[in-house]
Every structure is written in C-alpha cells, then in structure tokens.
Amino acid sequence: MSPNLSDLPPIYFYIPREDWPDDGIPETPNVYWQNFGGGITAGVYAWTVQTYQYLKADGLPCQLVGELPDEGILFSHRRSIPDDFKPGPNLLFVCLKAERNRHPYAQLHVVGNPLDLQSQSLVPGDRWLLSNDRHYIPHWPQPGLIPRDPERGDRFENVAFFGEGRNVAPELRESSWLEHLNELGLTWHLVDRNRRDRWNDFSYVDTIIAVRQFHNTADYAWKPALKLYNAWHAGIPAILGRGESAYRLERRSHLDYIEVNTLDETLAALKRLRDDLEFRHAVIENGRRRAEETQPENLVKQWQNFVLDRAVPAYQHWRNSPAIVQQAYLKRCDLAVNTENARKGLQKMRNQLGIRTRLRAITSKLKS
C-alpha cells in the first residue's frame, strides 16, 4: 500500500545554488528554455527541474533547493552531486543518472534506458553496491515541442537531424549526401548546437534521421529514446540507426520507426516515405498512438509510483537500519571507489609507459 501524501518525508530536488541562473528558472515544465549555463545543462533541466515541476503540479509535496539537506529523500542529477557526497543516517539519495556514470554512494538510481538496469560496466566496482538500486523511467519529451504543421499536408521535402553535430554519421556530413538528397528532391536540415534555439520546432520537418554511425555495434545503454519520442509527438516518421538499445527496446512493430545500417538503406527509406503515402500515413498514425505512452501525465504516474512505492520504503528502511549497517554500506562504497581509482591509476601508468616506450623507439630510430 502506498503511503498517504500527508505522511511523506521531506522530498527535495537539488541543484547547487551557485548553478542557478540570475534570471531564474521557468515556473512551468513545458517551456522550451535554453538559458543553460553553469551547472544547469539540458539534462539537469529535464531530469531535475521538469521532474520537480511536474510532480509538484500533480500534488506531490516537494521542494527545489540549492542546499543539500540532512534529512528526507534527495533527488539530484549526477552532474550536480560531487563524487564524494555520502548520504547521512536520515537521508536517502536518489541519483538521476541520465547519461552519466552511477554515483558510488547513491542508494537508488533513476535511469532513462531499460538496458541500463542490467549494465554492470559503467562504473567498475558496481558489484559491491545494491543489485536492485536502479529504476527505469522514460525521458520527458521535448518541452515546448512544436509539431509538424498540418497545413503541409502530404508534402515530403524536409529531412532533419536535431542535436549535437558530432553525433551525425560522417557519411551524412559529406557533400555527396546533399547531392543524394537533391536527386530525391529533398532538403537537409542539420539543426545542431548552433541552431539549438530551434531544437523544439518540427513544424517544417517531414522526417528525422538520427544515425551516429553506420554498421554500428554499440548499444549506447546510457542513452534515452528521446529522438524517437519527439518524432512520435511531432507527428513525423523517424529513420534511426541500428543497434541503439533505447530505440530497439521501444520497438514493437516496423511502424515505430525505420531502422537503417547503411547509407543505401537510408536513401531507400527516404524513397519509400516519399513515394508510399499509405505507409507514411501508417507510420505517423502509429506514432501518434505511441506518443500517448510518454505524455507528461502518464510519466507523472510512473514518477509518483516510484516515489511512493520505491523511494519512500527505501528511505524508511535506510533510516531504520542500525548505524553499523549504514556504515557497512558506505564502507563497501568506499571500497568500490578505491578499487576504481586504483584501476585508473594503473591504466594511466600503463599508458605513460607505453608512450615512453614508443618515444624511446622513435628516438633510437632517429639516432640510427
């Protein structure tokens, strides 16, 4: 049985006070805000600020704070918390892991990719930590998203990528790519960091492409399926790279998105979307149905369930544990940290020795 809201411990969402912008933070969550700076990145805004605002608006008693509390349940993005922060005897620390490594002392983590529930490789030494400390909740969709303009009708002209330019496959940055699109009667829109003021605007877009690299074998277990969610909410098809776990774990049918692994497959996907109107309509309609799953009101329910059914009992369990049990947990975390630091130090020495060996070999050749 979930606890009554009036009986909850204090619940805090934390961003260091020195990271707060001078002109403040938006008061509502569905605002396309770009005034990032200092410690408030897009990830901190999404995972900390938006989550706090949505839950607060839904009636969960919680606070956004700039100072670390001593008691209650603390939610904070991994970037906002120093590596050596240790929860006290009356504090449960829930790390909003996002796309970073796990915090070595957090009792619970929230992750944005289901595969991250299983991964043991992001933080060597995890074997000393709790085996069930992770909980998956999908990323909030793009705030302030402007969907495709319905006045565009069945036009299929604009192909876009939204995000960091370095995350676009090299083949899609070459002049030949533009030539291929020109032959198809299509226009390429690389909406990268320099145009981040338009990352929420899908009004003119007919399909998105998100491929980091072709012939991909990486699963990117720390990445969320945000680009796919945004395409569903915007009412456009998505052409996505093969292998990325976040997309594959969301996929239930071939209509969810088109998966490609080569440039030729990408061009074939564009031709099909351009020429097969019935297929394109089916993809868009399917996306509208799938978008319901990540509507904010549905994600709020998942967060509420996590807070009430997982975090609050974990807080009570931690607080009621004998001091020796709490200290033993923190000692195990210390051991994991020390082991990882030793591993890094050893690797650094190996790298330095390797460089010195190569330099000696080069010097010897030059002398001879």
Image: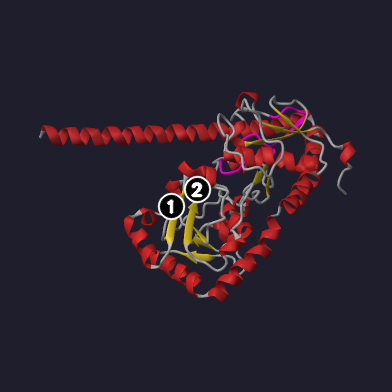
Mark 1 residue element: loop
Residue 307 appears at what percent x and percent y? 77, 43
Q: Residue at x 51, y 75 (%)?
A: 276
Q: Nearer the viewer, residue 259 or 306?
A: 259
Q: Nearer the viewer, residue 32 or 312?
A: 32
Residue 301 appears at what percent x and percent y? 77, 51
Amino acid tagged 2: Gly
Q: Is residue 232 above or below residue 299?
A: below
Residue 244 placement, left or right of 16: left
Amino acid tagged 1: Val
Determine which of the numbered discs, if any, sits on residue 247 in the image: none
Hey, which quadrant is residue 51 in on the image? top right
Q: Nearer the viewer, residue 164 or 360?
A: 164
Residue 51 placement, left or right of 279: right
Residue 124 placement, left or right of 324: left
The residue singled out by tag 1 in the image is 168
Query: Which comes sooner in the sequence, label 2 or label 1?
Result: 2
How would you classify the magenta stretch by its main secondary structure? loop
Q: Is residue 320 above or below residue 130?
A: above
Residue 216 appears at what percent x and percent y? 44, 58
Would you call the spot at circle 2 few (<14 residues within 10 Å), some (14-19), or many (20 or more)? some
Residue 268 appears at what percent x and percent y? 43, 70
The residue singled out by tag 2 in the image is 163
Q: Quadrant of the C terminus?
A: top left
Residues in magenta? 87-108
**Is the residue under label 1 in contact with that under label 2 (CB below 8 Å)?**
yes
Mark 2 residue element: loop
Q: Residue at x 70, y 59 (%)?
A: 292
Q: Is residue 94 magenta?
A: yes
